[in-house]
């Protein structure tokens, strides 16, 4: 379907930076994806609220993207508008002792460094997660025994009508890779983290330790979307996949990593279809051999 994007002309470059027919393989950690009709970097909450209202009024689909670290985008691209949050959405501030307010577009790596600089502990587990604050809160990201639910105090968001609201900690409904935002059209704008005072040496030591584990165990040298499958209750996805003899299995340019079988990697110019077909094959084999159904942690867009 062909959409009319003329309404975007009301925005200035100070509000929104607009690119047409933008290749999405430039904006995902998988390095896969066709062109988006429109790719916007929105720089203010006011512009975001206005853009959402105009998209709805003109019946234009839109999609919020962070670092693209948990996405598999169709080779045919994305119809409508892809929105990346920049500008004031990347800002961070220390509001009071132990509390850091971050814009949802801020990279987790930047926030971890900011917390270290201010001698605040609690975010170490996120060091090395290649995502944004908003995406992490949206899916309750976690690693090495830590999760967003452990440190998030409140989240501000724009609802489907463009109105700015907020949830307190006990309203966020965090669970494994889910939150109150998972099935709603809300857009996270700010996250408030509650952290603990600790020495910079202790924090840096923990960050270095966890980064060392990532580098030694994960295939960071290849494009991927991180862990491909959610952890089945009572099992580990990577162990099941390895026990089924699927380590190194491939379809086209996509491969089950030899280094960590929980990762499907873009080994050699993989297409979206290569990855989808390999995921389907892995799920089928694990269910056939182990009787366990695997569910994807990766989100399919435009597929």
Image: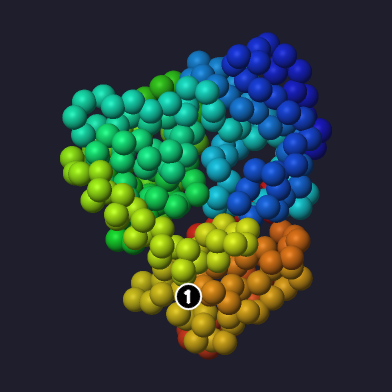
- In the rendered image, residue 64, in percent from the top left (x then y), is placed at 56, 37
- In the rendered image, residue 7, in percent from the top left (x then y), is placed at 71, 16
Name the residue nearer the viewer: 178 or 263: 263
In the image, 294: left or right of 221? left
- The part of the image, by quadrant, that contains residue 208 is bottom left
The image shows residue 203, relative to residue 17, as above or below, that is below
* Image point (42%, 29%), residue name: 103
- In the rendered image, residue 11, in percent from the top left (x then y), is placed at 65, 13
Q: Is residue 294 visible?
A: no
Q: Which of the colour schemes (rainbow, by chain, secondary structure, one colour) is used?
A: rainbow
Q: How many marks?
A: 1
- The part of the image, by quadrant, that contains residue 36 is top right
- In the rendered image, residue 12, in percent from the top left (x then y), is placed at 65, 12
Q: Is residue 214 visible?
A: yes
Name the residue nearer the viewer: 257 or 149: 257
The image shows residue 212, relative to residue 179, as above or below, that is below
The quarter in which the C terminus is drawn is bottom right
Identify residue for label 1: 238
The image shows residue 269, relative to residue 139, as above or below, that is below
* Image point (68%, 32%), residue name: 39
In the image, 112: left or right of 106? left
Name the residue nearer the viewer: 161 or 296: 296
Name the residue nearer the viewer: 162 or 150: 150
* Image point (44%, 52%), residue name: 128
């Amino acid at each position: 379907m062909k959409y009319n994007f003329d309404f975007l002309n009301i925005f200035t470059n100070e509000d929104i930076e607009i690119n047409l027919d933008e290749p999405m393989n430039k904006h995902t950690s998988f390095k896969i994806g066709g062109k988006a009709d429109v790719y916007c970097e929105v720089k203010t909450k006011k512009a975001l609220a206005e853009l959402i209202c105009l998209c709805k009024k003109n019946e234009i689909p839109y999609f919020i993207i962070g670092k693209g670290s948990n996405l598999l985008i169709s080779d045919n691209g994305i119809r409508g508008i892809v929105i990346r949050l920049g500008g004031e959405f990347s800002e961070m501030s220390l509001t009071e002792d132990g509390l850091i307010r971050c814009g949802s577009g801020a990279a987790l790596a930047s926030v971890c460094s900011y917390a270290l600089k201010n001698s605040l502990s609690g975010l170490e587990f996120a060091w090395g997660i290649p995502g944004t604050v908003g995406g992490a809160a949206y899916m309750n990201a976690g690693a090495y025994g830590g999760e967003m639910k452990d440190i998030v105090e409140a989240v501000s968001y724009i609802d489907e009508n463009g109105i700015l609201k907020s949830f307190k900690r006990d309203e966020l409904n965090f669970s494994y890779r889910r939150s109150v935002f998972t099935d709603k059209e809300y857009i996270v704008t700010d996250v408030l983290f509650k952290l603990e005072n600790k020495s910079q040496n202790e924090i840096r030591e923990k960050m270095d330790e966890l980064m060392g584990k990532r580098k030694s165990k994960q295939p960071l040298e290849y494009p991927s979307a991180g862990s491909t499958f959610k952890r089945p209750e009572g099992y580990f996805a990577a162990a099941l996949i390895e026990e089924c003899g699927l380590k190194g299995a491939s379809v086209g340019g996509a491969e089950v990593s030899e280094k960590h079988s929980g990762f499907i990697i873009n080994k050699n110019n993989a297409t979206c279809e290569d990855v989808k077909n390999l995921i389907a094959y892995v799920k089928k084999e694990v269910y056939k051999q182990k009787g366990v159904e695997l569910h994807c942690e990766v989100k399919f867009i435009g597929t």
